[in-house]
């Protein structure tokens, strides 16, 4: 699976992936989540134009998973990560999140954040396995507080929900240039 930046013609496909990822929520009785509309093309395009929409593609360059993010209070916030159920549990979600971690490090952001359902096995417990920790209410930054308020208005708090954060280790410092000989040859 290759990860690349999303292109405009990918966006309708991402809506299809989002609809498909709703189905497992139906199986655990979260019908409203299963039936929730995917992000609009306008929202997806905003993330794409901001350079914050990535897709994992199959051999024919068709997206099978995607991740969109935004900067919230100086952290890279995952707005959505979705993997088509047909290719779930093959490490694609983890690879997309790793990719975002690299992007965040490269842009100098110290952490990833997200909001998620506490008790859904492929939500908070999954992110905990990837190293995310729960952020308590008194640790919430203004942007995250606003996101949680919007989610509550939208009815998402019918099920326990939480905010999680992954602190990133800084990118390795650039190696000091090796000493050079008088002929411009690098000594190794
Ligand atoms: C969450 C999600 C992105 C994970 O992507 P993925 O590529 O399947 O995950 P990975 O292959 O990196 O990791 C697999 C792990 O995820 C968890 N997981 C994934 N699907 C699961 C399921 N149906 N039931 C329980 N655990 C599941 C398990 O911990 C699994 O590890 P295991 O296979 O060793 O048990 C994907 O399940 C998804 O798109 N879900 C629907 C959308 C969603 O809930 N997004 C998050 C909103 S906050």
Image (cartoon, grey):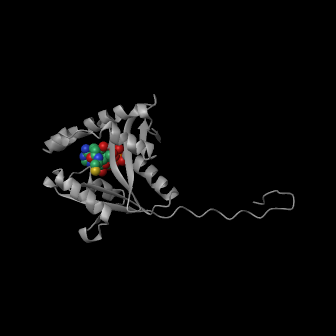
Query: Can you give x and y, in whole percent of width and height, for residue 160 in the image?
Result: 17, 57
Q: Position of residue 184 (x, y in %)?
A: 83, 57
Q: Residue at x 38, y 50 (%)?
A: 69
The answer to whether 17 appears left or right of 176 in the picture is: left
| Residue 7 placement, left or right of 140 | right
Q: Residue at x 50, y 61 (%)?
A: 108
- Identify the image quadrant of the N terminus: top left
How many numbered dots are placed on residues in this image?
0
**Residue at the (39%, 45%) spot, across then down:** 47
- Using the rendered view, name the quadrant where residue 62 is placed: top left
Q: Quadrant of the C terminus?
A: bottom right
Give coordinates of residue 170: x percent, y percent. 50, 64
Task: Indicate the quadrant where residue 136 lies.
Answer: bottom left
Q: Residue at the top extreme?
A: 60
Which of 170 and 91 lies nearest the eye of the viewer? 170
Compare residues 47 and 89 and report the one nearer the observer. 47
Q: Is residue 92 visible?
A: no
Instruction: Name above or below for residue 174 compared with residue 159.
Output: below
Q: Nearer the viewer, residue 172 or 47?
A: 47
User: Where does the image place residue 59, in percent across and percent down from the top left?
Assistant: 46, 30
> Can residue 161 be seen by looking at this rendering?
yes
The residue under the point 41% across, 31% down is 9
Q: Furthest residue to the right? A: 183
* Left or right placement of residue 19 versus residue 96 in this view: left
In this picture, is 16 found above or below 28?
above
């Amino acid at each position: 699976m290759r990860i690349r930046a999303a292109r405009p013609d990918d966006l309708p496909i991402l809506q299809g992936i989002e609809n498909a990822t709703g189905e497992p929520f139906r199986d655990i009785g979260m019908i409203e989540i299963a039936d929730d509309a995917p992000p609009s093309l306008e929202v997806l395009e905003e993330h794409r134009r901001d350079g914050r929409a990535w897709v994992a593609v199959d051999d024919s360059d068709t997206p099978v998973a995607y991740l969109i993010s935004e900067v919230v209070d100086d952290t890279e916030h995952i707005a959505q990560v979705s993997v088509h159920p047909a290719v779930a549990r093959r490490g694609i979600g983890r690879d997309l999140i790793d990719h975002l971690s690299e992007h965040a490090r490269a842009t100098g952001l110290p952490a990833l954040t997200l909001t998620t359902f506490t008790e859904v096995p492929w939500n908070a417990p999954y992110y905990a396995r990837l190293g995310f920790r729960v952020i308590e209410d008194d640790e919430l930054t203004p942007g995250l507080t606003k996101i949680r308020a919007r989610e509550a208005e939208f009815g998402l708090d019918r099920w326990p929900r939480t905010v999680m954060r992954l602190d990133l280790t800084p990118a390795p410092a650039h190696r000091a240039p090796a000493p050079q000989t008088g002929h411009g040859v690098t000594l190794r």
